């Protein structure tokens, strides 16, 4: 046989379900949970119960109160969103406003308002670097790379030491690097994310890490104190230089067209061995008849794996078992080639006459 409290709960739940607006729901709440509501009345009645009955009824009462409270909250949420949809019915919030010359010197943008006249509204567009980044991410996704991330303000371990870059390396010079008073620095490259990724997960790894990097470079048409890179890292069993070349060739031909020529030239980086620089040339691109340097890359140096093992406190990246490649692509340069942009400073000047050309 049902306890009267169970009966009460079922009645309450039925009434809550049937409440068709907020007032009706509030009335139901008062009827059951209000000061002199019927569930509250049971609380009073508890005092009159015998020792044996009290805990049983107490539990039942708590369950009833909780069930009713939760049901009221849920119903309130449903009623709220119904009200919202009714209010928005017939309004297409994705429809662009009408652009008209305003009385002011430019246009002004107004978000959705109740105003029923002309809305002078201009559409924005993505920054060319963002467009470049999105295209790159799409291509790398198809190759099985996922996204990784790290901070712009770094410590020397992630920027240099773990990357086999000794204290006397010129990259660590104050003339080349922005140091903070506490010894941290603005990362000079995105290779920091290689270390962070390996510290936090065992192999195999296949990530790209796009982001900003900073150097005390003399600023001119092709150099900026802040620029952008796409770092790549692939660690697995039996990864070879052929895999590295294949991946970068595929990426660059997807981006610049199948007739793109790609050259790998020997180079030196402390954290890769062998190390290579990547150059491209393509007649399909404006100014593409000369070779342009686009990336540094190489096979992950065993010392880097050992540094990661030290930080992890295990042997997860055993250089005898695992090998990998890494690359750092210059994103600003990729975008400059792709969109035929003559000066890197244009990216940061916020000049609408420039930005609108990529809308
Ligand atoms: N971090 C290097 C740079 O900024 C590029 C690089 C990345 C080289 C990964 C090798 C491997 O110049």
Image: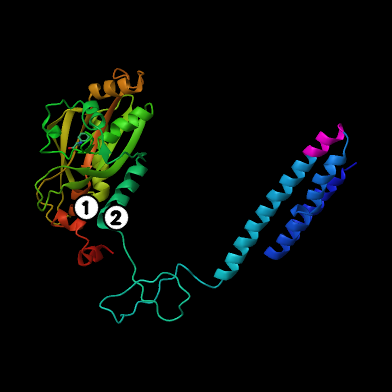
Q: Can the viewer see residue 70 in this picture? A: yes
Quarter of the rendered image showing ligand 1: top left
**Which callout, 2 or 1, points at the residue further toward the start of the chain?**
2
Q: Is residue 57 magenta?
A: yes
**Where is residue 6 shown, x and y percent of the image?**
83, 45
Residue 300 place in picture, x, y as percent = 24, 27
Magenta stretch holds residue 15: no
In the rendered view of the protein, which quadrant contains the C terminus?
Answer: bottom left
Q: Answer yes or no: is residue 257 visible.
A: no
Marks 2 and 1: CB-CB under 8 Å?
yes
What residue sits 62% from the left and 57% below the top? Answer: 77
Q: Residue 10 at what x, y percent from top left? A: 81, 50
Residue at 78% across, 57% down: 31
Write down the region rendered in magenta. 51-59
Q: Mark 1: give few (<14), some (14-19) or many (20+) Cα within 10 Å.
A: some
Q: Quadrant of the N terminus?
A: top right
Closest to the observer: 280 or 307?
Answer: 307
Residue under label 1, please give it.
335
At 27% from the left and 48% from the top, the residue drawn is 254
Rendering quarter of residue 16: bottom right
Q: Secondary structure at mark 2?
A: helix
**How dense is the environment of label 2, judged by Cα within 10 Å: few (below 14), some, or many (20 and up)?**
some
């Amino acid at each position: 046989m049902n306890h009267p409290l169970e009966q009460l709960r079922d009645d309450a739940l039925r009434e809550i379900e049937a409440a068709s607006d907020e007032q009706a729901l509030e009335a139901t709440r008062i009827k059951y949970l209000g000061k002199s509501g019927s569930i509250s009345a049971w609380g009073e009645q508890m005092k009159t119960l015998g020792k044996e009955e009290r805990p049983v009824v107490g539990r039942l009462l708590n369950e009833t109160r909780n069930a009713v409270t939760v049901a009221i909250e849920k119903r309130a949420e449903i009623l709220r969103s119904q009200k919202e949809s009714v209010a928005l019915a017939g309004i297409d919030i994705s429809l662009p406003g009408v652009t008209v010359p305003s009385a002011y010197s430019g246009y002004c943008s107004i978000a959705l308002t109740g105003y029923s006249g002309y809305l002078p509204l201009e559409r924005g567009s993505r920054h060319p670097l963002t467009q470049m980044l999105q295209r790159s991410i799409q291509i790398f996704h198809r190759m099985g790379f996922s996204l990784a991330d790290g901070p712009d303000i770094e410590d020397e371990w992630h920027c240099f030491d773990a990357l086999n870059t000794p204290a006397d390396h010129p990259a660590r010079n104050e003339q080349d690097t922005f140091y903070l008073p506490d010894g941290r620095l603005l990362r000079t490259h995105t290779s920091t994310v290689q270390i962070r990724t390996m510290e936090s997960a065992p192999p195999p790894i296949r990530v790209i890490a796009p982001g900003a990097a900073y150097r005390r470079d003399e600023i001119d048409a092709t150099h900026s104190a802040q620029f952008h890179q796409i770092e790549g890292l692939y660690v697995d069993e039996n990864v070879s230089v052929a895999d590295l070349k294949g991946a970068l060739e595929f990426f660059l031909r997807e981006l610049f067209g199948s007739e793109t020529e790609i050259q790998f030239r020997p180079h030196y980086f402390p954290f890769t061995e062998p190390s290579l620089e990547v150059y491209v040339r393509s007649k399909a691109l404006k100014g593409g008849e000369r070779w342009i340097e686009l990336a540094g890359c190489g096979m992950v140096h065993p010392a880097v794996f050992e540094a990661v093992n030290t930080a992890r406190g295990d042997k997860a990246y055993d250089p005898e078992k695992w090998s990998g490649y890494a690359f750092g692509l210059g994103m600003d340069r990729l975008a400059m080639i792709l969109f035929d942009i003559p000066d890197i400073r244009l990216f940061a000047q916020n000049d609408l006459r420039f930005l609108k050309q990529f809308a």
